[in-house]
Amino acid sequence: MWEVPFGNRLAAAAVAGIAIGVVACGSATPAVGTRPPTVTPTPAALGAPEACGPVTVAQDGNVGPVVCPDGRPSAAAIRFFARIPSRLLKLGPDATAAQVLNAACDDLDAPPPNAGTIPLVTTEAELAFAENSWSFGDLSPGQINQQLVSGACVPGATSGG
């Protein structure tokens, strides 16, 4: 008959080692009273600012990045834009698409520091969309840019509402 040199002690040690490894690595089933980790952020967390690095100011006065890689607004961009009077950035999460476009037109028609630059107003829109978790379907920062470039905003025509 074939015999293992260490007998049952080796088998017992191997089983104990595997059991310790399973306990140390955890199991696929969460313990009672715990929840598995959230894979995607909640809607409230999406608009929460994140410290993801500094912003840079381009020659045209535009600033970037205003949105972090995970889609949340950049805390550095929020600090930068706090110095610029912007109707677009004053809107809250309940704003309508019409209010957003009107505010963008007002900001385009604003005196310095906005100085009517389409890139800066488009960047403000990108930040405002991230901060407020806006999703209008028919209006996005890119579509606002297209509207501004195409001349959809008539200077002085918006009423601020």
Image (tube, grey):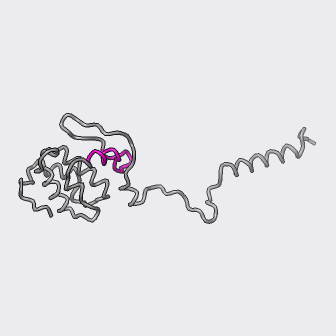
x and y percent of residue 85 in the render? 20, 51
In the displayed image of the protein, which residue is found farthest to the top? 59
Q: Is residue 148 left or right of residue 25?
A: left
Q: Is residue 28 left or right of residue 7?
A: left
Residue 132: which quarter of the image? bottom left
Q: Is residue 147 left or right of residue 95?
A: left
Residue 74 shown in magenta: yes
Residue 53: which quarter of the image? top left
Above or below residue 156? Residue 119 is above
Number of numbered discs present?
A: 0
**Identity of the residue drawn at 47% across and 55% down:** 39
In the displayed image of the protein, which residue is found farthest to the right? 1
**Identity of the residue drawn at 70% across and 52% down:** 23
**Identity of the residue drawn at 84% across and 48% down:** 12
**Identity of the residue drawn at 39% across and 45% down:** 51
On the rendered image, what quadrant is the N terminus found in? top right
Residue 35 shown in magenta: no
x and y percent of residue 16 in the render? 79, 48
- Magenta span: 66-81
On the rendered image, what quadrant is the C terminus found in? bottom left
x and y percent of residue 121 in the render? 19, 48
x and y percent of residue 61 in the render? 20, 39
In the displayed image of the protein, which residue is found farthest to the front? 83
